[in-house]
Image (spheres, rainbow, N blue to C red):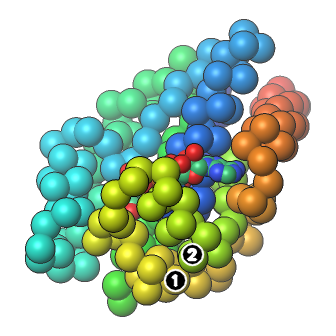
Amino acid sequence: MKNTYPGFFVIIEGIDGSGKSTLANNLYLALKKQGKDCLLTFEPTKGQWGAILRQSFFSEQRLAPEQELNLFMKDREEHIEKVIVPALKQGRIVICDRYFYSTAAYQGARGLDPIRIIETCKEASIEPDLCIFLEIEPQEAVKRIRHGRKEDVNNFEELDYLTKVAHIYDQIKDECVVLDAQNSIENLTQQAIRILLERLKEKVRSSSS
Ligand code: ADP
Ligand code: TYD
């Protein structure tokens, strides 16, 4: 479903270590500084389904792909109903770190059909007004994860798997604005703000005409 609420919905996508959380946070702070009413959120959430998923990231035995897909979908449904839609109704800018392209890429990398996942998600959930995709080589992303956290990568961050995920993102990224994640954090924040404000203006213009 298209977002017909007064608020603006932007999502940040990319493989683990691409810099999504950093950019989402910077974007949030920069917009707040400009006096914009925004909400920063992420998936998987900390709700009941997200908690089960997070536990599974470090478990010996990974959930079956369909089971994982089902949990991410339930988590998103709850997120939309309790967090995203109420904020959009209030006219806020909602910045979400990961959304349904993550499901297509990550569960797609486990053998499920990514295009079908996107189609289903577009019917079942609110489509974003803007998707920013941070592009990075998987080797570079894994280096960042190891360096940044001083700990090993988990089930979802292993290089072979992330390479498959990156390959699927490559097939679906046309629906997003692609930014080179190797740019500096400041540069990426500036680009993201510029693109977001342009899209926001377009949305206001088209909804008032
Ligand atoms: P993600 O949310 O995509 O997993 P993070 O935002 O947590 O990624 O960033 C992963 C690591 O890379 C962190 O240590 C972060 O400080 C670093 N980082 C983020 N963006 C950049 C960037 N543009 N250039 C260099 N390092 C970055
Ligand atoms: P996240 O907490 O965003 O990890 P990070 O901050 O390290 O990027 O997401 C945790 C993992 O969940 C991540 O490896 C990607 C995965 N994921 C899916 O497999 N499917 C999904 O639909 C979503 C939203 C996330």
Q: Residue at x 83, y 43 (%)?
A: 187
Percent x, y for residue 9? 61, 38
Q: What is the spatial separation of the Cα atoms under label 1 and label 2, in whole angstroms?
A: 6 Å
Instruction: Tell me the amino acid under the disc marked 1.
Output: Thr
Q: The C terminus is located in which quarter?
A: top right
Circle 1/circle 2 CB separation < 8 Å: yes
How many discs appear?
A: 2
Going from the N terminus, do you reach mark 1 or mark 2 first? 2
Percent x, y for residue 4? 61, 37
Identify the element where label 2 is drawn: helix
Quick check: 144 left or right of 204? left
**Mark 2 highlights which residue?**
138
**Mark 1 highlights which residue?**
163
Quick check: 54 left or right of 89? left
Q: Quadrant of residue 22?
A: top right
Percent x, y for residue 92? 59, 22
Q: Residue at x 32, y 43 (%)?
A: 45
Identify the element where label 1 is drawn: helix
Q: Is residue 61 above or below residue 74?
A: below
Q: Is residue 120 above or below residue 71?
A: below
Instruction: Tell me the amino acid under the disc marked 2.
Output: Pro
Which of 93 and 32 lies nearest the eye of the viewer? 32
Q: Residue at x 53, y 43 (%)?
A: 21
Percent x, y for residue 30? 72, 23
Is residue 119 among the parts visible in the rendering? no
Q: Residues within 10 Å of mark 1 (few under 14, many from 20)?
A: some
Which of 28 and 17 lies nearest the eye of the viewer? 17
Quick check: 142 left or right of 69? right
Q: Residue at x 53, y 66 (%)?
A: 143
User: Is ligand 1 closer than 8 angstroms to the Cβ of mark 2?
Assistant: no
